[in-house]
Amino acid sequence: MLRFIFCIIFFSSSSAFAQGNALFAFATLKTSEGDIRLKLYKKEAPSYVDNFVGLANGTKQFRDVRSGKKVRDVPFYQDMIFHKVHPKLGIQTGCPWGNGKGWPGYTLKGEKNSLKFDKPYLVGMARIKDDDNSVGSQFFITTEKAPHLDENYTVMGEVDRGFAIVDKISRAPRDAMMKPLRPIQLKRIVVEE
């Protein structure tokens, strides 16, 4: 009986310990098509997740596209569009200019981990140039396995809920540059830590 009680206490405190250390952050993308909830890997991609969460919450300083001034205490991810969609590749957003060339006024050093793009619905940070150190604010969600991304991009999370919304956005009619013909909005991101 005592051994049984110890096992219950041990397993209960182990899960509480994992939750208390916040191995994950959760972020809900509020889009014009519905909600997509992401599970972000704080342990495996700490600088990318920290950057993403800071931009989403408004705790990370960035350069405002319109004024050119540095801004803080304002969420970065507001009223943006998904500028790239494809059913076999995925969806991409986070560009303040809406053309895939925008950034928050800074870039991050490339971050690597051992995770692979070995299943659909994985989240990675996009780059604005062909350079590991050009990650800023843009991110993508895959819709299929994408082993070709393993060497150049880093898995920082996965979709937790809203798979059908990712698929719906990825199938939107698009032009030759993969931009949706009708704007699909990322209204805001709500983070739970």
Image (cartoon, helix red, strand yellow):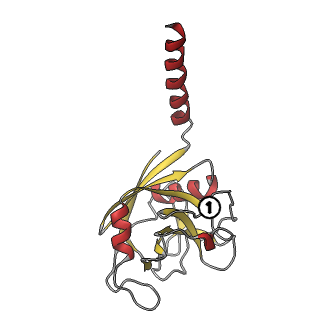
Where in the figure is residue 10, as x and y percent of width and height?
Answer: 55, 21
Q: Is residue 174 left or right of residue 99?
A: left
Where in the figure is residue 45, as x and y percent of width and height?
Answer: 62, 55
* Position above or below: 55 against 8: below
Which residue of the protein is positioned furthest toward the bottom in this rendering?
Answer: 176
Q: Secondary structure at mark 1?
A: loop
- The front one of 5 and 27 is 5
Q: Is residue 143 left or right of residue 152?
A: left
Q: Is residue 117 left or right of residue 94?
A: right
- Please report the residue visible at 57 percent of the width from the left and 53 percent of the height from the top: 50
* Position above or below: 103 against 158: below
Q: Is residue 185 visible?
A: no
- Please report the residue visible at 49 percent of the width from the left and 7 percent of the height from the top: 1
Where in the figure is residue 6, as x and y percent of width and height?
Answer: 54, 14
Q: How many marks?
A: 1
Where in the figure is residue 69, as x and y percent of width and height?
Answer: 53, 71
* Position above or below: 180 against 53: below
Find residue 165 and report its image quarter: bottom left
Find residue 70 and report its image quarter: bottom right
Q: Which residue is mark 1?
A: 116
Residue density around tag 1, few if under 14, some if 14–19, many if 20 or more, within 10 Å: some
Q: Is residue 20 visible?
A: yes
Q: Amino acid at mark 1?
A: Lys
* Position above or below: 58 against 33: above
- The front one of 75 and 183 is 183
- Please report the residue visible at 68 percent of the width from the left and 57 percent of the height from the top: 113
